[in-house]
Image (spheres, helix red, strand yellow):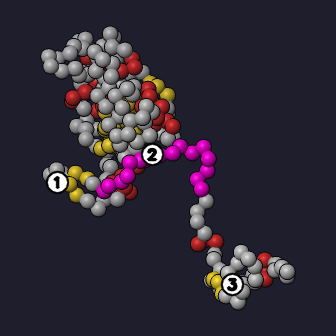
Amino acid sequence: VQTQTSDQLPPAGSWVQTQTSDQLPPAGSWVQTQSSDQLPPPPPPSGSPVVQRAPHVPHMESKEGTPSTGVTEASRSDEITSTTLMLKHIPKAYSRDMLCELLDSFALRTLYDFVYLPVKFSSNTSFGYAFVNFTTVDNAKRCHHIFDGFTGWNGGCEEPCEVSMQTKHRGLAACVELYRNSPVMHPSVADAVKPALFKNGERMPYPAPTKRIKPPRARAGADGAAGAQDQ
């Protein structure tokens, strides 16, 4: 069998005659060579976080509430214009710290500065949504790209996350002031269910209230976290 050196190989796209072999096409047939850019891409490196998503069905609600289709995932993220996002369909067993750990696992640790996951005071379970403020709009877009449609929750919940700008108060200053004098900041409330501030991934103290804070109380027929309904 006569071998060929690499400098004797034909250029990509040319036609060469095959040699006889049990594993090759019939002798005398012609096959086209393949260039390296036509080969399948290599598998992703091991150890990288795997983003589990529900099958993507393009769907967005217009301002009038009419569904519109044909919107790609990239364009959906490009529509984000606020640093403050609402993450919905979070498992109710999740705590604020669990949500932060999930964000951190996708390299978002230093990209957000405010997190609040409203919790029912009587049952200590969440309402299934949270508010997160990011340091820039681009960082908010990155979160949207990762978590809109995300289903990799701990605990087996398969409902996909929905990320939107469905908030009345936007920006860090507005979020801080909203809860600064809220009953959720009363000393009797556990720190784990309070809004949290961060800087470069480290927890920061919340600004002191400007007036006397009343203790939280459950309203008749409701079991809500004070101030959550106003976000």
Q: Secondary structure at mark 2?
A: loop
Q: Report the residue at 32% width, 26% height from top.
A: 126
Within 10 angstroms of label 2, few (less than 14), some, or many (20 or more) residues? some
> Where does label 2 land, which residue?
52
Query: Which stretch appears magenta?
Result: 43-58
The residue identified by callout 1 is 66
Dominant secondary structure, magenta = loop
- Give the image quarter of residue 194: top left
Where does the image place residue 202, in percent across and percent down from the top left?
A: 49, 28
Q: Position of residue 158 (x, y in %)?
A: 38, 39
Residue beneath disc 3: 26
Task: Name the residue located 23 percent from the left edge and 22 percent from the top edge.
Answer: 224
Dividing the image into 4 quarters, which one contains the C terminus? top left
Label 1 residue SS: loop
Task: Estimate the spatial distance between the alpha carbons at disc 1 and disc 3, rounded to whole Å.
Answer: 60 Å
Q: Nearer the viewer, residue 12 or 115?
A: 12
Q: Answer with left or right where residue 72 lies relative to residue 229.
A: right
Q: Position of residue 216 (x, y in %)?
A: 24, 14
Residue type, label 3: Pro
> Badge 1: few (under 14), some or many (20 or more) residues near its Cα, within 10 Å?
few
Decide: marks 1, 3 in contact (CB < 8 A)?
A: no
Choose the circle earlier in sequence order: 2 or 3.
Answer: 3
